[in-house]
Amino acid sequence: MSAILDGVRILEFSQVIAAPVAGQILAEMGADVLKVEPPGGESWRLQAMFAPTESKSFQSLNRGKRAMTLNLGSDAARDVAHRLTAEADVVLINYRPDVPAKFGIDYETLKGIKPDLIYVDLTAFGRRGPWALRPGYDGVVQAVTGLMAAEGKLQDDGSPGTISSTAVADYSSGIVLANAIVAALYEREKTGQGQFVECSLFATALSLQGDVVMELTSADEERNARRDQRHALAQQSVPFAELVAVRRGEAAVSPGECVYLTSDGAIAVSAVVEELCAATGASGEDALADVFLTRRDDEWQSALDAAGVAASIVRFPEDLGDHPHSSANALFADFVHDVHGRQRHPAPVLHFGGADAVPPSASPPLGRDTVSVLRDAGFGPDEIENLAAEGVIGAEAKS
């Protein structure tokens, strides 16, 4: 058996997180993903580097791909991009709406080269509207979509804090994009037609908030009253913390659905209060916090498991790689980087019983496959040498 997406060719003009996440998911399902970067490397390679042109951030998002460099601002690069497009099934791109046309890699241009092309376009704010041409990254999108304010985190100076543990809009958009590409490939199999697929970080971040942004008159009277009160206070230039407090209102966290400190850590629980009190021996909900402080978190985990109460120790992410549960479910895999050797990453999330697994492949060094890609596309040695000499491709291709 072959991998699920064996034979699918994806040309990825990407940077930062969202589109690279999509490309990596598809590579793990067997697609041939070619990542195109500027000669100096895309920005995420250069973010918190531990070695020249290498960062953990980049290496965690680009496994299983081939990589080439291409200076898209040069005229010669357009010919390269167009010749590569002729052999691609999918173009995956995440630039501002006005950028692809400047580089000659917009949908209309590439569709003329490959009529059944699937072109997947991710922007920060969409292609229309007053914000369309704004640059945007995850933190900015958290702010504008309400994710940041809804989180309710405040820094020491009273300013709002981001959801800093992960780039939630970026990663979610990457997953959405991967699903969209699979769906578009399926549609093309049925109809023979390619298409333009559009997504934005803004749209994804809104969709993640479901009932929060949903409008329902019969259920939103109290919410909307608080919204009106908040708007009125904002006109008075009150501190941001006061606006957050108004939004929260008097709603209290249920004692059965919260996190408790233990003698050596913390544990999260999700249960009916009466069940939780019975499992812990607490005399009532007001006693729960003190009772949890009397034992270690692993002792409470065992006791709550025995009582059938949903609970989990609050763990730190870097401790999960060696955990027996991770090992039992093969949630991590070993990779070997061309330059930096052995490394361990989260394994592909999906497991297909009817297809071969894709052998683990670490992220590629900058421009590793530039020459081989160009040769396969029909460029001769002299052409490749000229492209390198003119700076159309990176210095790694001059050898």
Image (cartoon, grey):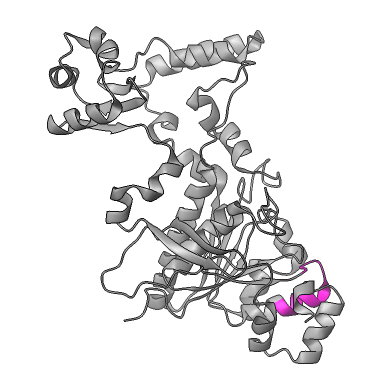
Image quadrant occupied by the N terminus: bottom left
386 w.r.t. 336: above or below:
below
Residue 223 percent across, percent down from the top left: 42, 18
- Left or right: 317 in relation to 218: right
**Residues in magenta, as a range:** 71-80
- Report x, y in % for residue 58: 60, 56
* Residue appearing at x 59%, y 53% in the figure: 56
Above or below residue 60? Residue 225 is above
Residue 393, can we see it?
Answer: no
| Residue 311 relative to residue 118: left or right | left
Residue occupying image coordinates x 81% and y 85%: 385
Residue situated in front as seen by the camera: 364 or 202: 364
Whether residue 9 appears in magenta in the rendering, the answer is no
Q: Nearer the viewer, residue 280 or 85?
A: 280
State whether residue 220 appears in this view.
yes
Q: Quadrant of the C terminus?
A: bottom right
Query: Which of the 4 quarters of the picture holds residue 53?
Result: bottom right
- In this rendered view, identify the residue nearer to me: 348 or 248: 348
Q: Is residue 263 above or below residue 202?
A: above
Residue at point 79%, 80% (across, down): 398
**Would you say the magenta stretch is mainly helix, strand or loop?**
helix
Whether residue 77 appears in magenta in the rendering, the answer is: yes
Q: Residue 12 placed where, x, y %?
A: 60, 67
